[in-house]
Image (cartoon, grey):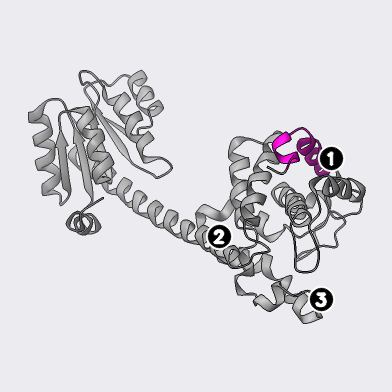
Amino acid sequence: MLSPQLIEEKVHNPLILIVDDIEAHAELMEAFLVREGYNVRATTNAQEAIRFTKNLSPDLAILDVMMPGMNGYDLCKNLKSLSGRKFFPIILLTGLDQLENKITGIEAGADDFFSKPFNSIELTTKIRSLIKLKRLQDELDHSEDIILTLAVAIEAKDPYTKGHSERVSNLSKKLAIFIGLSQAESITIKKAATLHDIGKIGLKEDILHKRGPLQINELELIRRHPIIGEDICKPLHSLKQILPGIRYHHERWDGRGYPDRLKGEDIPIIARIISVIDSFDVIVSERPYRRSYSINAAINLMNTEKSSGQWDPWLVEKFITMIENDPLIHKGE
């Protein structure tokens, strides 16, 4: 845990980690960056640098490449791994200036590569740029996490839909991989499926839980949730790729869906996948107006109705094949 004092310091003055096995070099770099207004932690030891990163969460690291034991390339890989999905900028410093050295640095995950002796103005300009990018990325990640948490919190209030988005997101990712989409595409689809119903945040519980038929005005409110969901997520650039999955997951293959009456392959594949999985989970889940179907009964129903115009028939076939060949899903585990 960061101390309150360090948290306060990091808000105003970014924390930079310096790693150089030559103590004099590390001290010179530390003095230079302190004059520039940064908080600095310097070390000559790679293992200590790893401990610093775990405990202090620096905003940026500057690593010397030529160090005994763990060199700068390997340390860069370690620190990037510690940061997980969060952006942690790393600059490598070295006396080597061959192209192959720079390529090795890039492959290690470095965000920039400076040869010694470096230009101090160029280095400080790059540091400011990378820290500004990190702060922006941190804000986006925080906003995205809030929306994802909100989506889960909304479902938790409703016993009939609790866990729905998580199940839809997991199965949507499985289907994306099963039909040959890339890992990156499958992750995007998983995120879109998690948030596909976020637009229901403004709907009253008496509409969502109604046992009888919906009135026309109630139906219109329900059909606005894809648009509302898109509007909620649109301000975040990090969620730009998932917007089609949110807006179009209630479009139909025959063009009679909502909100835009898209038809066939005009409906983005991300939305067509979510549509199939969303329908399946609704069928096998209990709702206020009916009991749940067994997985076998749901498969039979979707197989019978695959040409009804609701879903992409090819996707339904692929989904049924995937379900029938996955014993964990097929058994409902």
SS assignment at label 3? loop
Q: Quadrant of residue 139?
A: bottom left
Q: Is residue 234 visible?
A: no
Q: Is residue 305 left or right of residue 85?
A: right
Three-letter amino acid code at the position of disc 2: Val
Question: Where does residue 229 sit, x and y in percent of width and height?
Answer: 62, 65
Highlighted magenta segment, given as a residue range = 315-331
* Crowd rating for badge 3 (residues with CA inside 10 Å; few <14, some 14–19, many 20+): few
SS assignment at label 2? helix
Q: Is residue 35 visible?
A: yes
Q: Which mark, by number, is residue 317? A: 1
Q: Which residue is mark 2?
A: 152
Q: Which residue is mark 3?
A: 212
User: Toward the viewer: 205 or 107?
Assistant: 205
The residues bearing labels 3 and 2 have C-alpha atoms spaced at a distance of: 26 Å
Q: Which mark, by number, is residue 46? A: none
* Crowd rating for badge 1 (residues with CA inside 10 Å; few <14, some 14–19, many 20+): some
